Image (spheres, helix red, strand yellow):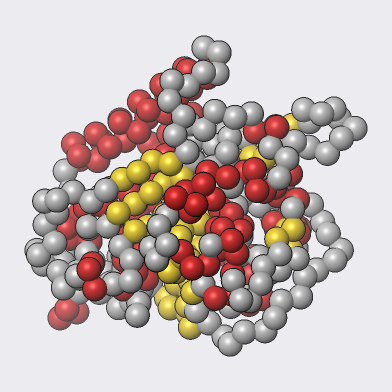
């Protein structure tokens, strides 16, 4: 989610050592080469993939129908808790695929046990719990492939619905602050026991949300992963960050639809996207089934949180290890904007996810899963 407004004042970030950049043709990147110079492509059952899509679409359509019938949702969960299955096949050999293969628009799911190295022992890493935070307009539903792959690898996964997103029943136009928007996430951290840590993952505007949580709960976050996400400097708002490259993103400007619930003479209260431009903007490399899911599931983005400046300290936010995953085919947050954020506030390492659009959980789910597993193992 990029926002096309110009701002004259720019934030200055404290200089950090250069990040170690990793492209996805290396052994530590998103798609790993097999031994002996060869490569293997593993395709799972179409039936299994179609079943996942059908279940997700059914849930989204049910939600849409409930909204149309008065807006009442029979259950209101701010998080979707997922736990690893006890019969994961973690001891089978990993089949590797080449990073140089032609991009597949269907990107079929591999067998989950093939996506995790057989020598991984989750008990020996700092945390095996991922917390996934969606971007603006999205919801916990967008992580369905990532949740399935991580769980089958033995990880615990929690996907958060932020206020007014996904199945969270709240009027987006009524959200007036970032703290209100991220309350389901901060409520989750309040319930985490002292001494327990998670790997916090943010996509798009979710990057600003996880930064906010890191400032409040640094001792409960082992690592933070930004996926095509807003990684701000202290004193900067998401609007200011995206506006730095306003002239380079005509598609975003064309797609935005602003809502003025408080009147046309007042600031916008929410933002939507033109459905006819949704695929080109957010899903230009993603399967059509996932675009259909998004078209019936996405909700408005609250405007006030986008305007709010983040204040981040070195002792709290700065104490958490950060990693960034670039999406080079991104039309919503162009790679130039991602590079600018990385240069101003260098993370520990940068990964380049070849062939990924703004929604790599749809366009490159296997590659994204491998990267998340890789990051979880970094000592």
Q: Quadrant of residue 163?
A: top right
Relative to 11, is 319 on the left or the right?
left
Q: Quadrant of residue 183?
A: top right
Q: Residue at x 22, y 57 (%)?
A: 154
Query: Where, quadrant-wise, is the C terminus in this rendering?
Result: bottom left
Decide: is 167 above or below 363: above
Where does residue 44 sit, x and y in percent of width and height? 18, 48
In the image, farthest residue toward the front: 194
Decide: is 62 above or below 41: above
Q: Residue at x 30, y 30 (%)?
A: 54
Where does residue 353 sit, x and y in percent of width and height? 43, 66
**Residue 162 in view in this figure:** yes
Decide: is 255 above or below 209: above
Where does residue 215 sit, x and y in percent of width and height? 60, 64
> Toward the viewer: 175 or 109?
175
Q: Quadrant of residue 171?
A: top right
């Amino acid at each position: 989610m990029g926002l096309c407004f110009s701002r004259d004042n720019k934030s200055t970030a404290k200089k950090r050592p250069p990040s170690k950049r990793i492209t996805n043709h290396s052994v530590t990147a998103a798609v790993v080469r097999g031994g002996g110079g060869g490569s293997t492509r593993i395709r799972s059952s179409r039936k299994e993939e179609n079943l996942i899509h059908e279940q997700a679409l059914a849930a989204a359509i049910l939600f849409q129908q409930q909204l149309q019938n008065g807006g009442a949702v029979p259950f209101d969960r701010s998080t979707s808790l997922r736990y690893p299955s006890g019969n994961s096949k973690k001891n089978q050999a990993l089949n590797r695929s080449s990073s140089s293969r032609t991009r597949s628009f269907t990107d079929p799911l591999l067998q989950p046990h093939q996506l995790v190295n057989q020598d991984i022992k989750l008990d020996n890493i700092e945390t095996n719990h991922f917390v996934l935070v969606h971007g603006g307009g999205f919801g916990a539903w967008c992580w369905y492939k990532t949740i399935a792959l991580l769980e089958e690898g033995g990880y615990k996964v929690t996907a958060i619905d932020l206020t007014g997103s996904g199945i969270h029943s709240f009027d987006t136009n009524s959200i007036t602050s970032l703290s209100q928007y991220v309350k389901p996430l901060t409520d989750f951290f309040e319930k985490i026991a002292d001494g327990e840590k998670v790997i916090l993952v943010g996509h798009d505007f979710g990057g600003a949300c996880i930064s906010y949580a890191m400032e409040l709960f640094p001792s409960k976050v082992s690592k933070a992963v930004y996926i095509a996400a807003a990684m701000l400097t202290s004193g900067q708002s998401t609007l200011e960050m995206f506006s730095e490259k306003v002239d380079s993103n005509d598609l975003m400007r064309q797609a935005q639809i602003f809502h003025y619930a408080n009147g046309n003479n007042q600031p916008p209260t929410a933002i939507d996207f033109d459905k006819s431009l949704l695929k080109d903007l957010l899903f230009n490399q993603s399967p059509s089934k996932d675009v259909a899911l998004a078209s019936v599931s996405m909700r408005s983005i609250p405007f006030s949180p986008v305007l709010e400046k983040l204040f981040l300290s070195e002792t709290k936010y700065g104490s958490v290890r950060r990693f960034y995953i670039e999406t080079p085919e991104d039309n919503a947050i162009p790679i130039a904007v991602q590079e600018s954020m990385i240069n101003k506030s260098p993370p520990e390492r940068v990964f380049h996810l070849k062939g990924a659009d703004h929604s790599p959980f749809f366009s490159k789910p296997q590659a994204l899963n491998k990267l998340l597993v890789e990051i979880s193992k970094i000592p």
